[in-house]
Amino acid sequence: MLYLDNYYVLSIVLSEVLKAAHWAITFVMVLKNPGIVSSARMTVMPDVNQKDRFRRANSCEPCKIISTKTEHCDRCDVCFEEVDHHCPWMNKCVAKGNLKEFYIFLGLTFGSLFYALGISLSKASL
């Protein structure tokens, strides 16, 4: 019985560490600047050549930005550099500035899910 109690304590500690890491990365992801590109900083980004400027570059009238790497989000009403998507749960875009934290968040979420599934299956077999 002592053997099972040690694993029970270990599972409680591991679940609390996963929960704390999950909350910490969530706060970092929500509070971090996702990569907003402002028109005060630049009007034409350096990745756009004059020859093919109108062929492959995105131009944003509200933000006054011309670039191949930016995209305007209608919900946030700003341009982001290398935007991935607009997250409705955070009410914020996931872009170049917080993409690494988003992937860590996904990894922790699925890791916690599989951990909880493993614990449930191991308790069901006892």
Image (cartoon, rainbow, N blue to C red):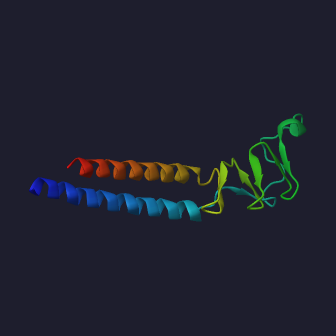
Q: Is residue 108 left or right of residue 86?
A: left
Q: Splitting the image into 4 quarters, where does residue 22 fall?
A: bottom left
Q: Residue 47, how many percent across, how many down? A: 77, 41
Q: Is residue 81 left or right of residue 110?
A: right
Q: Residue at x 39, y 61 (%)?
A: 19
Q: Residue at x 33, y 62 (%)?
A: 16
Q: How many marks?
A: 0
Q: Splitting the image into 4 quarters, where does residue 46 fall?
A: top right
Give the farthest residue toward the left: 1
Q: Residue 73, how many percent across, how many down? A: 75, 55
Q: Is residue 13 left or right of residue 87?
A: left
**Quadrant, the N terminus:** bottom left
Q: Residue at x 20, y 54 (%)?
A: 7
36 shown above or below 122: below
- In this view, the residue in front, 96 or 6, is 6
Q: Residue 20, how many percent across, how many down? A: 39, 63
Q: Residue 26, how many percent across, how many down? A: 51, 61
- In this view, the residue in front, 59 or 88, is 88
Q: Is residue 114 left or right of residue 102?
A: left
- In this view, the residue in front, 40 or 124, is 124
